[in-house]
Image (cartoon, grey):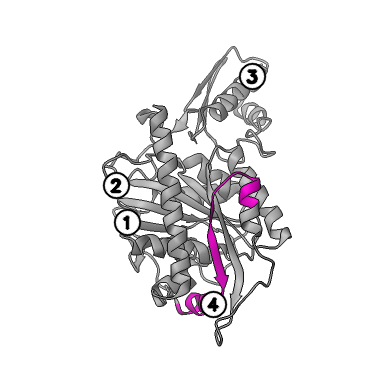
């Protein structure tokens, strides 16, 4: 009995992504299936960063397909980590020069980006997007070429936080990012109407993120900051698969329930071999706008203690202040609106810590070779 594509698809759905309960088909890793008699070929999307994960996936695919009746030979291609071989560059994407001497993290999707840093949180409501926006603004203020990708598919907030209501234009089949305050910006919110709910399954989320990475004309960047949705799911895994990440910044608030979720987010990045740059404690204190007195609303020091327990860097504390709300509603991040204020100073310290930690990890990686 001849094997069919449906048989192959069913067998591949039994292969789970290492460390997750979802299968490689639903995560969009299987790109093409070819059947020639008793020979079955499968093309897999490159995974980023960890050869062990790629090897485990390839071995599991071979075992699953070899067990099918009528299959005599299994050919698997493209399972190496992204950036590991020029031959794995995505179809239709030409190589472009790096952003600066020293080499880009070339995934084929964003080859001109030197460092990609995700900003993530284990739960919503901790001010993750505020941190991502002001971190990008602080880096840009320091002279870096910076992009900000709003990958929060289900709740894009970057358009409102930068006061952008226009639609992006297309030049040469590539979306042109908006630019505000020295930051290149892209978000699904620029394309969808503000009241349109996004009710998408995993593969659609995967494809949307791929397009916002590879189909946008980012140009040479020192840092691409990626604002991820809260939690651990399709968007997080897609970013870690498709792009060699310089690291992830975990945002939390001081109370225990938020710290528990922060630990989950950190553990997820470790599973997919994405280094955690460090933890930012947001809403650490409330600064009274009238007298300037600081009050610990949620407790104090939870983020720093969590960083110590999990053996990662503590990047800094961000106070709770109405200025953040005003900046978000007015379309001008607080780092831009109040460049000499205490909030801008707090974010500049976080930005300096991120640059130092990314640089330290990069130097350690180079020393290995």
Q: Earlier in the sequence, mark 2 or mark 3?
A: 3
Rendering coords of residue 149 (x, y %): 45, 57
**Which residue, as the protein is rendered here, is positioned at the far bottom?**
290
> Mark 2 or mark 4: which comes first in sequence?
2
**Residue 90 visible somewhere in the drawing:** no
How far, Cα to Cα, is label 2 from label 3?
41 Å
Magenta residues, start to end: 306-330
Q: Residue at x 34, y 54 (%)?
A: 218
Distance between mark 4 and mark 3 Cα atoms: 54 Å
Q: Position of residue 116 (x, y in %)?
A: 43, 48
Give the residue number, with chain letter if any, for mark 2. 99
CB-based contact (under 8 Å), mark 2 and mark 4: no
Q: Secondary structure at mark 3?
A: helix
**Front residue (pair 248, 321):** 321
Q: Which residue, given by chain and number where applicable, does mark 4 sit on?
A: 325
Q: Quadrant of residue 286?
A: bottom right
Q: Which residue is mark 1?
A: 145
Residue depicted at 66% across the width and 72% down the height? 296
Relative to residue 239, is residue 125 depicted above or below? below
Work out whether mark 3 precedes mark 1 in sequence or the reverse, and give the earlier one: 3
């Amino acid at each position: 009995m001849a094997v069919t594509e449906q048989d192959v698809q069913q067998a591949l759905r039994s292969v789970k992504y290492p460390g997750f309960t979802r299968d490689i088909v639903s995560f969009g890793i299987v790109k093409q299936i070819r059947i020639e008699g008793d020979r079955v070929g499968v093309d897999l999307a490159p995974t980023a960063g960890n050869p062990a994960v790629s090897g485990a996936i390839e071995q599991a695919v071979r075992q699953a397909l070899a067990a099918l009746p009528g299959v005599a030979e299994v050919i698997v291609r493209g399972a190496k980590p992204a950036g590991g071989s020029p031959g794995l560059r995505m179809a239709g994407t030409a190589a472009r020069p790096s952003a600066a001497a020293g080499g880009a993290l070339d995934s084929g999707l964003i080859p001109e980006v030197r460092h990609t840093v995700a900003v993530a949180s284990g739960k919503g409501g901790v001010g993750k997007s505020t941190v991502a926006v002001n971190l990008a603004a602080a880096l840009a203020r320091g002279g870096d070429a910076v992009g900000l990708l709003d990958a929060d598919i289900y709740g894009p907030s970057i358009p409102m936080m930068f006061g952008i209501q226009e639609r992006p234009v297309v030049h040469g089949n590539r979306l042109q990012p908006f630019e505000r305050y020295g930051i290149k910006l892209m978000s699904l919110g620029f394309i969808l109407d503000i009241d349109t709910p996004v009710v998408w399954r995993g593969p659609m989320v995967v494809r949307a993120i791929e397009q916002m990475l590879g189909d946008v004309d980012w140009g040479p960047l020192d840092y691409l900051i990626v604002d991820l949705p809260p939690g651990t799911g399709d968007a997080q895994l897609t970013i870690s698969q498709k792009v060699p990440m310089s690291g992830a910044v975990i945002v939390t608030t001081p109370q225990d329930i938020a710290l528990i979720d922060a630990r989950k987010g950190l553990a997820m990045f470790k599973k997919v071999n994405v280094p955690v740059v460090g933890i930012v404690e947001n809403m650490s204190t409330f600064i009274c706008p009238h007298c300037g007195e600081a009050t610990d609303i949620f407790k104090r020091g939870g983020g720093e203690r969590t960083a110590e327990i999990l053996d990662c860097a503590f990047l800094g504390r961000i106070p709770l202040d109405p200025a953040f709300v005003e900046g978000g509603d007015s379309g001008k991040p607080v780092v831009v609106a109040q460049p000499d204020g205490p909030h801008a100073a707090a974010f500049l310290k976080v930005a300096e810590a991120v640059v130092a930690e990314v640089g330290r990890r990069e130097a350690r990686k180079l020393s290995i070779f």
